[in-house]
Image (cartoon, rainbow, N blue to C red):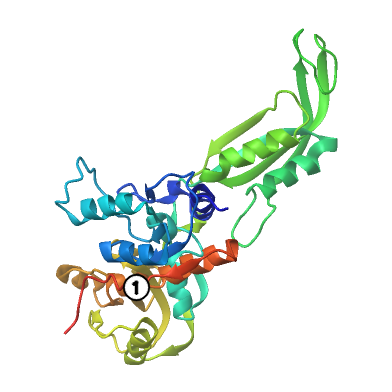
Amino acid sequence: MIKLRDITGYLESLAPLAYQESYDNSGLQVGDREMEVTGILITLDVTEEVLLEAGKLDFNLVVSHHPVIFGGIKSLTGRSPAERIIALAIKMEIAIYSGHTNFDAIWGGVNTAMANRLGLVRQRILDPAKGQLKKVVVFVPREHLEPVRSAMFKAGAGQIGAYDSCSFNLEGKGTFRGGDDTNPYVGQSGEMHQEPETRVETIVPAPLVGKVVRAMERAHPYEEVAYDIFPLENSYPMGGMGMVGELEDPVEEEVFMSFIKDRFGVSVIRHSALLGKPVKKVALCGGAGSILLGRAKASGADVFVTGDFKYHQFFDAEGKIVVMDIGHFESEQFTRELFYDLLKKKFPKFAVRLAETVTNPIKYF
């Protein structure tokens, strides 16, 4: 039996809700976390048609990229599409879970799927996240160094780029005196004690600090564990918005646009003026990525592939980069396959399907 909390917990372990943008509303939209899930239907957007499709399959969970609820909803009277969708979901007893900008902001998420679709190599985050790293420092008696450090690494500490188990270790002496009601691991209550200890410093993504500290405390022999947590200004190279990478071989701009149309199934690309030079480095952002144009230019990319560019924003290319707007839906459509692959890998014997309902509200003539 798989409960809704098993699925939401797994998805949020990959893309913590703390990673979402301030305007966003990722997470559980409708449903009881203790409910038993009968099947999962995956979609980019939730519509009434998607819910009816789930109902025909006897699936009671819809996982989407775009949330149903963005702003506050004060009533359910059916005056808006969101109200009608929520009311229908409650009536049909179908839960809705959305992974939006938190899945945009992780390595292996939406933008990675987009970059992989283009076969980009040497990928890196276009705009690495700020304020998402902490340093955890703990003081450990020498004979317990490996168990404590290993527990912290297993919980998610010590990851720097492609390196794991990263830490700095400094030998020293700790001093303490336990009160009358203590039971110290070493020394005697009421007596000053010195103990050879190792100061262990390691880096931790902010959403994992609690998990790392709990693992550290379980592995540590002391009654009271001495540790510090420091905020860091370092960028987080494994999280942030957009992606930049390179084609294996440079191609002409028109050839690259034809390649884009084939890989993303688009009929129209809105673009800024071509620069008449080969395309090698590609910056991209699923959905509405105009805010990252400056980062794309600074990265040295030849093109910036995204969606939802406005008329005046095309001027900001300034002859330094070619903006290629392929559409919001078109740039994010493979998020469905991303969710499908993740859920099938974790729950291989569970019913997971891609919705057949096409939710793109934009049509082309």
According to the image, label 1 marks what residue?
331
Q: Which residue is drawn at 76% across and 14% down?
A: 182
The picture places residue 175, in percent across and down from the top left corner, at 77, 21
Rendered position, 274 above or below 68: below
> Is 328 positioned to the left or the right of 9 in the image?
left
Rendered position, 281 above or below 5: below
Q: Residues within 10 Å of mark 1 (few under 14, many from 20)?
A: many
Closer to us: 299 or 246: 246
The kind of residue tagged 1 is Ser
> Is 213 positioned to the left or the right of 291 in the image?
right
Q: What element carries label 1?
A: helix
The picture places residue 39, in percent across and down from the top left corner, at 47, 61
Kindly tell me whether residue 45 is visible in this rendering: no
Closer to us: 222 or 298: 222
Q: Which residue is drawn at 41% across and 66% down?
A: 57
Quarter occupied by the C terminus: bottom left
Q: Which residue is drawn at 18% across and 68% down?
A: 310
The picture places residue 54, in percent across and down from the top left corner, at 37, 64
Kindly tell me whether residue 119 is visible in this rendering: yes
> Is 80 positioned to the left or the right of 116 in the image?
left
Rendered position, 258 above or below 108: below
Closer to us: 7 or 230: 7
